[in-house]
């Protein structure tokens, strides 16, 4: 499961003023929907990705943009410099870092009353492997995902480009800390509970948006008969051959909860093989970290319940974690909930002073990038 960044999920009723050109109310900072979309539309003739379906998808995002960060643009590959492989390859994509010389058109110039570019800026390029001929089914998924993630809480995507092999690439915001595991490695296991809860609130909001569109979180690919993923995060029913569901997304969320509470990778000291998959199917779950708040344990274990119908929905998770964030981050008045997290915080940092963090050695057969998971022995059970 990808690491989804945390952003505020609500928008205040702010007066953004009126557009100087048409006199209509702006619906976000510097964004007059009618005028900006017309400007984007008039620019259609000046670019093409070389694929009519990709062009139509990019145009769709622009014609339905509600604010400056809602749409994608096509970026010529020669706009990128210092393209480097960052040694992160999944089942369907490869990640590169690069410098986008012009940068995205995301900066509002107050004096000039117009949008400007803020390049050069470092970006991540996510190459879709073997994407020279993208299926119509893939494009259908892209439309659905764009709709569900519009103004949402997922990693920012600026646009799309095409490399020298004619493979398509998503142009995304570059995060120095990378994915969840890289983030934990850099934090050296020291995440405060307030940050953990706030981060989980953002992740749950992203999953909620995806589920509301009738989709399941996962990698966009056309083969629904094969299961790809990172073994410790895959629900037991999926390992047994069932298709992923919204409930299996919640199982993965529960494992993310454990990973953040532990500050380390799950089952990194053993092979990610049939034996581990079998143990997961027979009830193996992570060992609860000492000092974890009781309410956190209850929610986390409910997420990885062996019965998918007993797991909470993404909406329930988002609602609950939102209330936790308010209670422990914003509300100045103490409560039983905030007391639990305060006690856990004190223990975490007292333990850290006594025990120097040591990054655990990763078994050579423990894999944390997406790969094909096929265990016919479990399917036959």
Image (cartoon, helix red, strand yellow):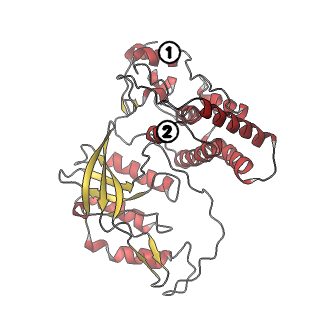
Foreground of the two, 280 or 325: 325
Foreground of the two, 88 or 342: 342
**Which numbered circle lies on residue 62?**
none
Tell me, yes or no, whether the two marked residues, 1 and 2, touch with CB atoms within 8 Å: no
Coordinates of residue 20 in the picture (x, y in percent): 51, 87
Of the numbered discs 1 and 2, the one sitting upstream in the chain is: 2
Helix, strand or loop for disc 2? helix
Which quadrant of the structure image shows residue 28?
A: bottom right
Apparent side of residue 9 relative to residue 346 in the rendered image (left or right): left
What residue is shown at x 27% (from left), y 73% (from top)?
Answer: 45
Residue 359 showing in the rendered view = yes
**Which numbered circle lies on residue 184?**
2
Q: Residues within 10 Å of mark 2 (few under 14, many from 20)?
A: many
What residue is shown at x 66% (from left), y 34% (from top)?
Answer: 350
What residue is shown at x 21% (from left), y 62% (from top)?
Answer: 78
Coordinates of residue 336 in the picture (x, y in percent): 81, 40
What residue is shown at x 57% (from left), y 83% (from top)?
Answer: 18
The residue tagged 1 is 279
Relative to 213, is 343 above or below? above
Apparent side of residue 97 relative to residue 36 in the rendered image (left or right): left
């Amino acid at each position: 499961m990808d690491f989804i960044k945390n952003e505020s999920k609500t928008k205040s009723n702010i007066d953004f003023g009126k557009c100087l050109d048409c006199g209509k109310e702006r619906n976000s900072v510097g964004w007059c929907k009618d005028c900006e979309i017309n400007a984007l539309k008039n620019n259609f003739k000046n670019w093409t990705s070389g694929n009519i379906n990709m062009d139509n998808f990019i145009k769709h995002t622009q014609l339905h943009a509600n604010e400056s960060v809602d749409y994608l643009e096509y970026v010529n590959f020669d706009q990128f410099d210092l393209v480097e492989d960052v040694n992160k390859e999944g089942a369907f994509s490869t990640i590169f870092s690069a410098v986008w010389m012009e940068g995205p058109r995301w900066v509002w110039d107050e004096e000039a009353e117009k949008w400007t570019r803020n390049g050069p800026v470092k970006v991540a390029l996510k190459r879709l492997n073997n994407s020279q001929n993208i299926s119509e089914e893939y494009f259908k998924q892209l439309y659905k995902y764009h709709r569900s993630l519009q103004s949402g809480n997922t990693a920012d995507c600026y646009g799309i480009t095409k490399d020298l092999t004619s493979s398509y690439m998503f142009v995304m915001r570059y995060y120095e800390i990378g994915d969840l595991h890289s983030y934990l490695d850099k934090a050296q296991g020291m995440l405060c509970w307030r940050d953990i809860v706030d981060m989980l609130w953002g992740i749950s909001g992203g999953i909620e948006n995806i589920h509301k569109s009738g989709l399941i979180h996962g990698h966009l690919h056309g083969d629904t008969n094969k299961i790809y993923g990172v073994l410790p995060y895959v629900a037991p029913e999926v390992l047994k051959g069932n298709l992923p569901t919204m409930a299996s997304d919640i199982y993965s969320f529960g494992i993310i909860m454990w990973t953040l509470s532990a500050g380390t990778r799950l089952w990194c000291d053993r092979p990610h093989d049939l034996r581990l998959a079998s143990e997961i199917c027979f009830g193996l779950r992570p060992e609860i970290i000492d000092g974890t708040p009781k309410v956190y344990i209850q929610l986390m274990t409910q997420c990885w319940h062996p019965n998918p119908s007993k797991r909470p929905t993404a909406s329930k998770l988002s609602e609950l974690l939102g209330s936790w964030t308010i209670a422990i981050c914003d509300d100045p008045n103490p409560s039983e909930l905030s007391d639990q997290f305060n006690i856990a915080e004190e223990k975490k940092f007292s333990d850290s002073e006594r025990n120097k963090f040591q990054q655990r050695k990763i078994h050579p057969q423990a894999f944390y990038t997406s790969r094909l998971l096929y265990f016919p022995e479990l399917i036959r059970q």
